[in-house]
Image: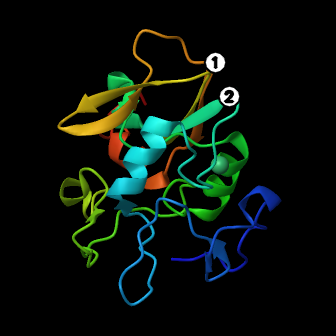
Amino acid sequence: MTDPTPPAIPLSMAHLPTAGGLAVPWITPRTGDGRHLFGAVDADRKDQALLRRLCGVCGRRHDERLVLLMRLSDLPRQCTAEPALHPTCTAYTIAACPMVGGRLDHYRTTPQALDPTMIRPVDSPARRGAPAEPWFAVWLPGYTVITDHGALAASYAGSTPLRIRPITWPVSFLRMTRPASTHGPS
Ligand SMILES: [Zn+2]
């Protein structure tokens, strides 16, 4: 599903390649035949971004504030394997990415064909076809790099986020979490 009108690409992202009118994030892998696999992650660039404090979207160094895009299920663990983003790059991602922006009800049902250097979204087999989850923007002054399930991740455990802002609460998730129909007082 794509939006009919792609959002305007900020100047700070003008150096990125585009596909279908959308800026392609720096960590998005590209296949040998030139296709960009939105949603998948280039393993080497992901680690570079986490370790060198680079933005996962534009690939440039962070300023004093950064944002981690987190799913509801990531929040209790206070870490995510996906690199932090600039605030501007976050706003663009919310506008451009149908999953983060809450415009998809479910995760894709068929696996992407990846090259060996690419990694799927961390738990994609588990997510395949599952209802989309709510996303949150966690604003931070910084993060620490930890190893989580054998992979590098950005953690803010032990520090207080500047703020945690809900981005979306997908309709399918509301349906799923709504209490079973109750027989209330009539
Ligand atoms: Zn950026």
Give the SS element for disc 2. loop
Q: On the rendered structure, is 78 left or right of 160?
A: left
Mark sitting earlier along the chain (2/1): 2
Question: Mark 2, mark 1: which one is toward the viewer?
Answer: 2
Q: Position of residue 69 (x, y in %)?
A: 51, 41
Name the residue carrying label 1: 162
Up-down: is 186 above or below 90?
above
Q: Position of residue 136 (x, y in %)?
A: 53, 37
For this orientation, the residue located farthest to the bottom is 33
Contact, CB < 8 Å: mark 2 with mark 1?
yes
Residue 179 visible, this angle? no
Judge by depth and name the residue closer to the eye, 186 or 113.
113
Per the rendering, the mark at residue 65 is 2
Give the SS element for disc 1. loop
Q: Could you tell me which residue is drawn at 57 percent across and 69 percent down? A: 24
Q: Tell me the quarter of the image containing the C terminus.
A: top left
Residue 88 visible, this angle? yes
Report crowding for label 2: few under 14, some 14 to 19, many 20 or more residues within 10 A (C-alpha): some
Q: Could you tell me which residue is drawn at 51 percent across and 77 percent down? A: 1
Report crowding for label 1: few under 14, some 14 to 19, many 20 or more residues within 10 A (C-alpha): few
Up-down: is 9 above or below 171?
below
Q: Could you tell me which residue is drawn at 35 percent across and 55 percent down? A: 44
Per the rendering, the mark at residue 175 is none
Q: On the rendered structure, is 183 left or right of 59?
A: left
Up-down: is 145 above or below 106?
above
Q: Position of residue 154 (x, y in %)?
A: 41, 31
